[in-house]
Image: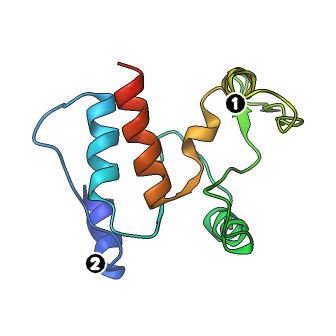
Amino acid sequence: PRIVAEFAARDSRIRPVRQTGNIGGLPNFRFVLNAARAPLFMWAAYDDWHGENYLEALSGALSADPEKEMAVPRIMRTRLDGTLAEITAITGLEALPRWRRVIRMLACSRGGMFYGLYRTPAIRAAYQRAERDFP
């Protein structure tokens, strides 16, 4: 809490919110998304490491193509021995039927795409569809 408070004191875009108790993972993701006020949105986990220009690069990618709703960086995993392993890039999706694209993205991303940078209205709509269609 102290570190977040220090950053919030320096930057008005940071708004600390602390739950009074554990509300669970998915409800917390929803809570944070619903509280978002900015045009772009991202979730970040406690164990994520980002490069120095992470947000700059992803927001630049979205600015360059207004039709895109999400930008995802190259994703690396840290193995138990400390070495890095790159997650396989997902290519060739355009020619696949929608259901195959979804399966391929889920199989290859290992959750990494979840932590990209989104246009806030797009991720809100997608999250609502997911909650509605995947109970």
Residue at horizontal 60 percent and vertical 49 percent from the top: 116
Q: Nearer the viewer, residue 46 or 29?
A: 29
Q: Residue furthest left?
A: 20
Residue 22 spot, x, y in % from top left: 18, 31
User: Label 1 to label 2, Cα distance in Å?
Assistant: 36 Å
Q: Amino acid at mark 2?
A: Ala
Residue 46 spot, x, y in % from top left: 45, 42
Other residues around mark 1 within 10 Å, as few (<14) / some (14–19) / many (≥20): some
Relative to 90, say whether 108 is above or below.
above
The label number, if any, that marks residue 9 in the structure image: 2
Q: Does residue 38 appear to the left or right of 69 in the view shown? A: left
Residue at horizontal 66 percent and vertical 24 percent from the top: 106
Q: Earlier in the sequence, mark 1 or mark 2?
A: 2
Residue 63 spot, x, y in % from top left: 67, 74
The label number, if any, that marks residue 133 in the structure image: none
Quadrant the N terminus occupies: bottom left
Q: Nearer the viewer, residue 38 or 75?
A: 38
Q: Does residue 90 appear to the left or right of 2 in the view shown? A: right
Determine the image quadrant of residue 93: top right
User: How is colour applied across the structure in the image?
Assistant: rainbow
Task: Say which residue label 1 marks.
Answer: 109
Q: Nearer the viewer, residue 51 or 37?
A: 37
Tag 2 secondary structure: helix
Residue at horizontal 54 percent and vertical 56 percent from the top: 118
Quadrant the C terminus occupies: top left
Relative to 12, say whether 31 is above or below.
above
Q: Amino acid at mark 1?
A: Ser
